[in-house]
Image (spheres, coloured by chain):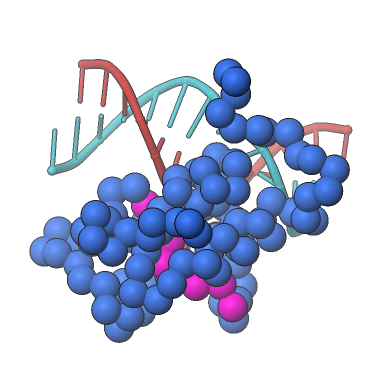
Chain colours: A blue, B red, C cyan
Amino acid sequence: MPRRRERKREAVEPASIHERIHAVARLVPRGRVSTYGQIARIVGCTPRMVGYAMASLPGDSDVPWQRVINSQGRVSPRGAGDGGLVQRKILEREGIRFDARGRVDLEQVGWEGPE
DNA sequence: CCTATGACTGGTC
DNA sequence: TGACCAGCCATAG
């Protein structure tokens, strides 16, 4: 099985890739964080897609977008505004610890997946 | 239909 | 540790 990821959409898939990404993001429990790459693997798309999907989320979404960070364990810098700071703040309130470098310990608070 | 635009990742130097 | 590069794909206008 050469292909590790099926890129082709199957006929019975949910409407959009965004929808699936959002669905997976909703699975991340409070007090834990996931990464774009992790979600991408679960959904079967590229990490970039996950980032774009999150970027298009409305502010009042029910998706815990704040629990999705990059592979370095850092809050990805946004193009505009201070969204990054807000995100970090929310996470800290959920119990996530950031070190002096602004990184979280993925080994400890990283989401293991839906099981 | 075509173009611009985005919250990434892994490898290399 | 940090900077740069190439791959990658859905959405909106």
Q: Is residue C3 left or right of residue A80?
A: left
Examine the rendered structure and indicate whether residue A13 appears above or below residue A61: above
Q: Is residue C4 left or right of residue A62?
A: left
- Residue A29 in view of the camera: yes
- Residue that appears at 50% across and 51% down: A39
Screen quadrant of the N terminus of chain A: top right
Residue interval drawn in magenta: A62-70
Q: x, y (%) of residue A108?
A: 23, 61
Examine the rendered structure and indicate whether residue A14 appears above or below residue C7: below
Quadrant of residue A46 within the rendered picture: top right
Q: x, y (%) of residue A31?
A: 34, 74
Q: x, y (%) of residue A15?
A: 79, 56
- Residue that appears at 50% across and 59% down: A114
- Residue that appears at 35% across and 68% down: A32
- Residue that appears at 40% across and 76% down: A30
| Residue sitting nearer the eye, A36 or B13 | A36
| Residue sitting nearer the eye, A85 or A27 | A27
Q: x, y (%) of residue A62?
A: 59, 78
| Residue sitting nearer the eye, A15 or A51 | A15
